Amino acid sequence: MATLAEIIAFLDDLLDPGAFTDYGPNGLQVPGSEKVATVVTGVSAGARLFELAAAADADLVLVHHGLFWSGPPRPLDRAAKRRLQLLFDHDMSLAAYHLPLDAHPAHGNNALLAGALGCERWTPLAKIGMVGHLPGEGITPQELIERTRRATGGREPIAFTAGPERVRSIGIVSGGGSPYLADAIDAGLDAFLTGEPVERVMNQAQDAGIHFLAAGHYATETHGVQRLGALLAERFGIRHAWVDVPNPI
């Protein structure tokens, strides 16, 4: 068993949230039990995740998308009350790491996606993303689609294959990373992978001659929190359970 303070200090030191201007607070969002024997990880904070975490006897719920985001303070609605009530009733803490978890060069969503796609190395793209470098002569666009499908749990990606016959470099920005397609084009990359598409990306990719893949916001952001849970289990000797609450978006 570890203390909540020890775990949050470890995560803050690992992910360095102070280095990012984010959309909401990173780190501990809701305090619960001071002792942690079980951590449950999931992508997005919500009532269903909290119910499943409570059933798994979680002391800490660790997510990528937390409950609180930037903007003026707003009154709580009934949905927010329900989420908080589940945490309070079961004395569960909630911690969230957003952009710092996307960007981490070893344990972040984008680095882990690069590894899952078979990249031999990766370098930063636009601070939160990665450029994955594929070995040798690269791979075909169809092989990239298949590797993406496997890396995201079998989800069929939206793909606009307008790039070169061999893919040697791929920009990766998980989640809602479509705006970073322009950075991939400016860098002369062969392909770009994100989670959610926006309407303009088809013409943008086709006109620039780059492959574009959108594999799901949720599906591209499952890797990082699972890795964090595994690290906590190894370092502190606590139990880790990954809870999948599938989201088709």
Image: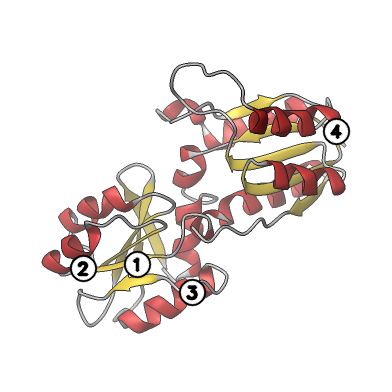
Residue 51 found in image quarter: top right
Query: In the displayed structure, would residue 99 be above or below residue 115?
Result: above
Quadrant that contains the N terminus? top right
Circle 1 is placed at which residue position? 213
Instruction: Bin the neighbour count of mark 3 within 10 Å (Cα to Cα): few under 14, some 14-19, many 20 and up.
Output: some
**Residues under labels 1 and 2: Cα distance?**
10 Å
Q: Position of residue 24 (x, y in %)?
A: 49, 28
- What residue is pinned by disc 4? 90
Q: Which mark is residue 149?
A: 3
N-term-proximal mark, 4 vs 1: 4
- Tell me how far mark 3 sits from mark 2, CA to CA: 19 Å
**N-term mark: 3 or 2:** 3
4 or 2: tag closer to the N-terminus:
4
- Residue at image x 40%, y 77%? 145
Q: Nearer the viewer, residue 53 or 73?
A: 73
- Contact between labelled residues 3 and 1, with CB atoms less than 8 Å apart: no
At mark 1, the secondary structure is strand
Q: Is residue 139 visible?
A: no
